Image (cartoon, rainbow, N blue to C red):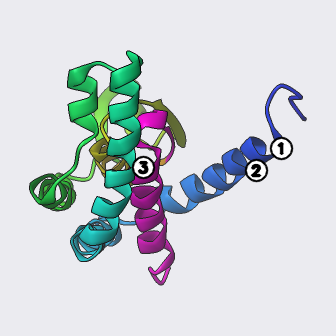
C-alpha cells in the first residue's frame, strides 16, 4: 500500500526502521547494554569528527541568528564542545545502567479461577521524534529507544543537520558492527 504523499525514500526508511525494530525488540538486556557501552566509546573516539561537523552547523546557526530565523538561545543550543560530547557518551552508560523496561509485568488481575490477565510492557516498534537545535538529542533519544527495544526515526532542525548526520552515522556504525 503506497502513500503518494510520502517519498519513496522515506517509505524505504520506514521499512528499514520497522525491520530494525523487530531485531531490537528481541535483544536481551545484556546485548542492549553492550551496544550502549560500545556507542559511548564510539562517540568519544570520534569527537574530532563530531566537532568538525558542529563547526559547520555553528556557521549556519550564526547566519540564521543574523537573519532572525534563530534566537540566540537556540543558536547556543546547537553548539557542542568536548564536555557535551563526553556527557553524551556518559549518558549512554547511564542508560545502560537502567533496568530493562521490556517484559515487566505492570499489572496482573485474576479474572476467574485459573484465568489470569497480565499487562506486560513491550517495545512500541518505531518511534518518530522531531526536534530542533540540540544535536545531543540524537544520542539521548537513540539510547533510550535502544534500551526499550525500539527503533527511532529522527528529524532534527536544519541548524544542526551536519552534527545530527554524523551522530546518526556513528549510531548506525555501532549497531552494524555488532555481531547479532
The boundaries of the magenta stretch are 152-180
Q: Are marks 2 and 1 in contact (CB under 8 Å)?
A: yes
User: Which label sits in the foreground, 2 or 3?
Assistant: 3
- At 41% from the left edge and 72% from the top edge, which residue is drawn? 174
Q: Position of residue 167 (x, y in %)?
A: 39, 58
Relative to the observer, which residue lies in front, 42 or 159? Answer: 159
Badge 1 crowding class, 10 Å Cα cut-off, few under 14, some 14 to 19, many 20 or more, is few
Which secondary structure, mark 3?
helix
The dot on residue 164 is 3
The residue that disc 2 covers is: 12
Q: Position of residue 124 (x, y in %)?
A: 49, 38
Relative to the observer, which residue lies in front, 155 or 94? Answer: 155
Q: Is residue 84 left or right of residue 144?
A: left
Q: Pick out the residue farthest to the bottom.
A: 179
Magenta region includes residue 110: no
Relative to the observer, which residue lies in front, 108 or 125? Answer: 125
Q: Position of residue 43 (x, y in %)?
A: 27, 67
Q: Picture quarter containing residue 6?
A: top right
Of helix, strand and loop, which mostly describes the magenta segment? helix
- At 47% from the left edge and 63% from the top edge, which residue is drawn? 169
Q: Picture quarter containing residue 58?
A: top left
Of the 4 image quadrants, the one containing the N terminus is: top right
The residue that disc 1 covers is: 8
Q: Is residue 148 left or right of residue 5?
A: left
- Distance from disc 2 to disc 1, alpha carbons, whole Å, reads 6 Å
Which secondary structure, mark 2?
helix
Tell me if residue 132 can be seen.
Answer: no
Amino acid at each position: 500500500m503506497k502513500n503518494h504523499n510520502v517519498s519513496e525514500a522515506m517509505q524505504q526508511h520506514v521499512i528499514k526502521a520497522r525491520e530494525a525494530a523487530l531485531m531490537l525488540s528481541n535483544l536481551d538486556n545484556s546485548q542492549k547494554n553492550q551496544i550502549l557501552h560500545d556507542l559511548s566509546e564510539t562517540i568519544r573516539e570520534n569527537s574530532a569528527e563530531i566537532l568538525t561537523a558542529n563547526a559547520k552547523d555553528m556557521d549556519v546557526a550564526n547566519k540564521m541568528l543574523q537573519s532572525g530565523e534563530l534566537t540566540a538561545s537556540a543558536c547556543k543550543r546547537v553548539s557542542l564542545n568536548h564536555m557535551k560530547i563526553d556527557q553524551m557518551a556518559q549518558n549512554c552508560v547511564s542508560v545502560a545502567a537502567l533496568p530493562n523496561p521490556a517484559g515487566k509485568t505492570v499489572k496482573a488481575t485474576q479474572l476467574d479461577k485459573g484465568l489470569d490477565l497480565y499487562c506486560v510492557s513491550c517495545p512500541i516498534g518505531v518511534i518518530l521524534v522531531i526536534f530542533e537545535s540540540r544535536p545531543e538529542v540524537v544520542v539521548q533519544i537513540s539510547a533510550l529507544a535502544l534500551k526499550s527495544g525500539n527503533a527511532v526515526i529522527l528529524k532534527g532542525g536544519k541548524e544542526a543537520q551536519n552534527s545530527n548526520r554524523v551522530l546518526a552515522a556513528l549510531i548506525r556504525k555501532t549497531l552494524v558492527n555488532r555481531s547479532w
